[in-house]
Image (cartoon, coloured by chain):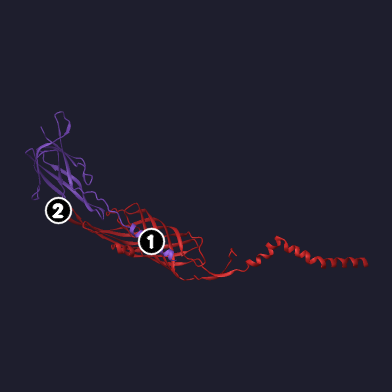
Amino acid sequence: MKVKALIFFCFTALISLFGPKVSAQVVDSSRYQKSVDKPMEIVVAEKKNVFVEHDLRIGIDMHNYILGIMTPYRTGIDLNLEYNLTHDLSVLVEGGYNYFERENVRVSYISKGSYIRAGVDYNLREDMGANDRDFYYIGARYGFSLFEQEVPEYVLVNGFWGHSIGHMSNEEAYAHWFEMVSGFKVEIIKNWYLGMNLRLKFFIHRSKGGIEPVQYVPGYSQNYNSAVLDFNYTISYNIPLNYKKKKIAVYDDKK
Amino acid sequence: MMKHIGFFSLLMSLLALSSCIKDETCLSSNSLLITDFYTVNQNSEIVKYKMDSMSMYIIGREDSILYDNVKNIGSFNIPMADTLQQLKILLTLNNVQDTIWVDYRPYEVFRSINCGVVNRFEIKNVDYSINSIWQIYMNNNQIDESKSTNLFLFYRTH
């Protein structure tokens, strides 16, 4: 019995003497540092205002107004509505009404009508900061226009019989086309964007009538070639519906 | 932000300049019915023919002498009226008179804003007297910018 008591005492004494040293050896091991010490630093995460997806933007295209300074024969209103599905992808609808009138000594021509375009934009920026909301994007559109063409007056030049005047009556027409888009949007003040894009447009199909070739298709532009390079200048407003700059924790890997 | 606005303005200016439309070249219109003279020679071959003298005017229109005793002529042109559908032409070929009636349909063709509208003509029928004219063959019933010969007039030489 005395022997058993002696062994227990010695074992207890050994643990009490060497125990802290064993524990210090464990602390020194790199394995233990990774699993225990480092997480204590990462847990310290800042809360920042970050841009939350699902913007809804409404905009107006200034293309006709800007070009109208140089070429006052085109007027109209062009609006667009855009909704961000994800950080990269947004769907949008564009539409409007255009009026185009040209007149010279030989002919006067009118084309007027409405159009709608639908498509997607893909944001190319990956390094956007927490409050950075500028976009560089590429996209695609499908466009459709219902419009009317008319030649209210034309002059036929005939050296022998004399000149005569005629007209070509109003005719309805339609056109489908496809667009490839590339552009950017810059937030100039909170929720207000200036944007510009380039568009390469191809006809998919269009009706053919008496006034052929068609000179202007609303939403498509002047039709001088099989493909048209066009551009738009937009001013957009981000409607703050359910959108908020929320404070959420951001784990910064650089720390 | 200023960097973006500067870039935006520059691109906007460049593209506004690039939006200018190039001038278009307009093909000249044609409202002339073109007729060539032919005949059948003694070997029964169809050959081109040059008229010794020819006069022509359009009946129903004053001051319409288009050819006045023109010598050594191989073809002639009749100007079509944009507002009529028939022309009556009096021909004097080597001092022999003949009359030609041309029924046609003018139709308008829009070309572009810069080039305007032109009339083209579809010849529907040609009648003629047969004093010196042996036969008239319609080669092409469209009078348009192609300016191809419309009628072959076979002259009776013997």
Pick the front one: B91 or A188: A188
Residue closest to the far left: B95
Residue tagged 2: A162
Q: How far across and down, in percent of the image, does residue A230 sit? A: 36, 57
Circle 1 SS class? helix
Pick the front one: A146 or A192: A192
Residue closest to the far top: B43
Chain red in the figure, letter: A
Inspect the image, locate mark 1, and give the three-letter code of the amino acid beneath it: Leu
Q: How far across and down, in percent of the image, does residue B12 sit? A: 37, 61
Circle 2 SS class? loop
Disc marking residue A17 = none
Inspect the image, locate mark 2, and give the three-letter code of the amino acid beneath it: Gly
Q: How far across and down, in percent of the image, does residue A254 sit? A: 58, 63
Q: How far across and down, in percent of the image, does residue A66 sit? A: 33, 64
Disc marking residue B10 = 1
Disc 1 chain ID: B
Chain purple in the figure, letter: B
Residue count near mark 1 (Cα–Cα under 10 Å), binned few <14, some 14–19, many ≥20: few
Q: Quadrant of the C terminus of chain A?
A: bottom right
Q: Quadrant of residue A120?
A: bottom left
Please give the name of the residue rendered at 14% of the width and 31% of the height, measured from the top-left corner. B41
Please give the name of the residue rendered at 22% of the width and 46% of the height, measured from the top-left corner. B145
Q: CA distance from mark 1 to mark 2?
A: 51 Å
Disc 2 chain ID: A
- Please give left or right for residue A36 compared with residue A68 in the image: right
